[in-house]
Every structure is written in structure tokens, then in C-alpha cells.
Image (tube, helix red, strand yellow):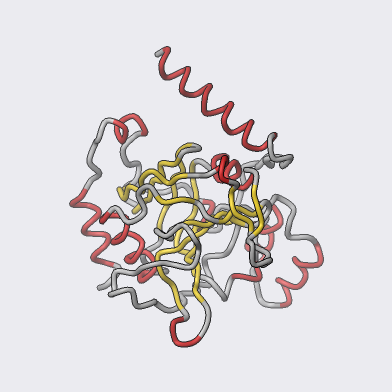
């Protein structure tokens, strides 16, 4: 019990220091009451991803029915260990944190299809609300498309103001979607640009801590910020399981996920 309490205190201190040292403040996020799919608790047997990181654990439910190629690629790579011991190479407060590039540069990436990219899977029922897990798309020429890179939306509550809400209404968004954006914050301008394939249901405080670390701007002057060397964030492991999945203690002890159930759900993504 003492070890568990000490570990929890150490994590809390790490999260607080990560934000206070950079001058950024982690937002207070109230629970969003919405009928939108992304704000519903996962059901038993839902496919999930567990991100074990140097700042704590993040859990996201995946949506293979809505974004089959993005999910199948992510799950396939995760099971090979592709994401293990990679870094979060982009951290932009109020925007997103991004990883999934084994080179750690943001210029690389891979897919299970001999590194060939996959197309956009924009689903009208999934939006770039805060906490959305999204496929980052490469740009330029015929190579445009998704690969191994992903990001968590870290937009702040209140970031979708009244003017933006009115624009969403004019663009055909439902009242529930507009209300969800107003409550949670998000990046609606990316809804038809990048694929949403999951949603954080536990560990959003860890995502916010990632967005709070001290950063440095790209040397090429682009509007991209990376964690400073002494604030590096490591994705130690990505585990694919079915909800509720193994506990953090079971993962640390080397517990195996429910492979049979996972394989059945993954097969559905290419059915």
C-alpha cells in the first residue's frame, strides 16, 4: 500500500511540475454531459488502447466501425511494438500532442501496408473534441495520407466560442455536437481533414500534462513546438485490449491482454 501511495504522489508531483515549470496551466475539465458517442463510457468488449508513458497512463476507446483502416493500422503496429519507447515529438498547448513516429522527428512514419498511406476516413459521428485520438495525415504529392502518426486533441474548454458555434450550425452540425464542442473545446476545422479513430476516456490529465511541458520551436521556424530535451515524453508501451482491460498494476506485472477478443474485433475492421 505504501508503494502505491508513493507512486501516486510522485505522479501528481510530476504532472504539477510539468505544467508549473513551463508557465502553462493545465485546464480544469468538467465532465461533459452529452449523447455524443465520444462522451459515452466504453462498453464491455470495446477495443481500447492503453498508452503507458513517462507521465502516466492514457486510455482511449477505438472505433473500428467508423475508421477501420486507421484502427487496423494502429492496432497492427501497436502489436508489433512499433510505438514502444517512442517519443511525443510535438506538444502545443491548447492544440494537440503528437507521436507515433519511430524516428522521433515528425517526418517519418509507417503502416502495416508496406508503408503505403491510407485515405481519410471522416465520419460525421466523430469530431475533434478535446480528447479525440486522431490519425495525423502526411501532406504533399501522391504520398498524402495516414501513417503511424497520431495525436490527442488538447484544446482547452471554451476554445470553441459563440462565433465558431454559429458557424458550425451553418455548416450543418447538430445541436448536440455544437453543445459538446462548447463544453469540451476542440478543433472543428480539422473534422474533414484528419481521421478521428478514438477518444480518451481515462488519463486526460496526462494528455494535458504532455501539453504543458516546456517546449522549443522547430529550427525551420514552422509553427511546431517540441518538448525540450529535459522535458522529453516517452511512450513506453501501447497495449491493445478489450474494455475494461488489464489494470496498470497488471500491465506492469506483464499481464497479457485478451488476445482472442481483440483478434475478433480487429478482424471486423477489414471485413
Of 155 and 264, the residue lying toward us? 155
Residue 103 to residue 243: above or below: below
| Count of numbered badges drawn on the protein | 0
Determine the image quadrant of residue 35. Answer: bottom right
Q: Residue furthest bottom?
A: 142
Q: Quadrant of the C terminus?
A: bottom left
Residue 83 location in percent, x, y? Answer: 36, 54
Of 262 and 101, the residue lying toward us? 101
Q: Residue furthest left?
A: 260
Residue 30 to residue 61: above or below: above
Determine the image quadrant of residue 268. Answer: bottom left
Residue 34 location in percent, x, y? Answer: 60, 53
Residue 180 location in percent, x, y? Answer: 64, 57
For the point 60% across and 58% down, which residue is it?
Answer: 129
Determine the image quadrant of residue 165. Answer: bottom right
Q: Is residue 267 left or right of residue 96?
A: left
Q: Quadrant of the N terminus?
A: top left
For the point 34% across and 78% down, which residue is it?
Answer: 116
For the point 78% across and 60% down, which residue is it?
Answer: 161
Q: Residue furthest top?
A: 2
Of 139 and 62, the residue lying toward us? 139
Residue 23 location in percent, x, y? Answer: 74, 40
Q: Residue furthest right?
A: 163
Of 67 and 175, the residue lying toward us? 67
Amino acid at each position: 500500500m505504501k508503494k502505491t501511495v508513493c507512486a501516486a504522489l510522485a505522479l501528481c508531483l510530476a504532472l504539477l511540475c510539468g505544467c508549473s515549470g513551463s508557465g502553462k496551466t493545465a485546464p480544469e475539465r468538467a465532465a461533459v454531459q452529452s449523447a455524443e458517442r465520444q462522451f459515452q463510457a466504453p462498453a464491455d468488449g470495446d477495443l481500447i488502447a492503453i498508452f503507458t508513458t513517462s507521465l502516466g497512463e492514457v486510455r482511449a476507446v477505438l472505433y473500428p466501425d467508423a475508421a477501420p483502416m486507421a484502427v487496423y493500422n494502429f492496432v497492427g503496429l501497436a502489436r508489433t511494438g512499433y510505438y514502444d519507447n517512442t517519443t511525443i515529438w510535438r506538444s502545443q498547448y491548447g492544440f494537440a500532442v503528437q507521436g507515433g513516429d519511430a524516428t522521433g522527428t515528425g517526418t517519418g512514419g509507417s503502416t502495416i501496408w508496406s508503408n503505403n498511406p491510407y485515405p481519410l476516413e471522416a465520419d460525421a459521428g466523430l469530431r475533434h473534441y478535446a480528447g479525440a485520438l486522431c490519425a495525423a495525415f502526411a501532406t504533399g504529392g501522391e504520398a498524402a495520407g495516414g501513417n503511424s502518426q497520431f495525436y490527442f486533441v488538447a484544446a482547452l474548454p471554451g476554445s470553441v466560442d459563440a462565433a465558431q458555434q454559429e458557424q458550425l450550425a451553418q455548416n450543418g452540425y447538430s445541436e448536440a455536437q455544437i453543445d459538446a464542442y462548447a463544453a469540451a473545446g476542440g478543433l472543428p476545422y480539422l473534422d474533414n481533414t484528419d481521421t478521428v479513430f478514438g477518444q480518451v476516456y481515462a488519463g486526460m490529465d496526462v494528455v494535458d500534462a504532455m501539453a504543458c511541458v516546456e517546449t522549443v520551436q522547430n529550427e525551420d521556424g514552422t509553427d511546431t513546438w517540441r518538448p525540450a530535451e529535459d522535458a522529453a515524453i516517452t511512450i513506453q508501451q501501447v497495449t491493445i485490449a478489450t474494455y475494461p482491460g488489464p489494470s496498470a498494476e497488471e500491465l506492469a506485472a506483464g499481464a497479457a491482454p485478451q488476445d482472442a477478443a481483440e483478434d475478433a474485433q480487429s478482424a471486423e475492421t477489414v471485413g
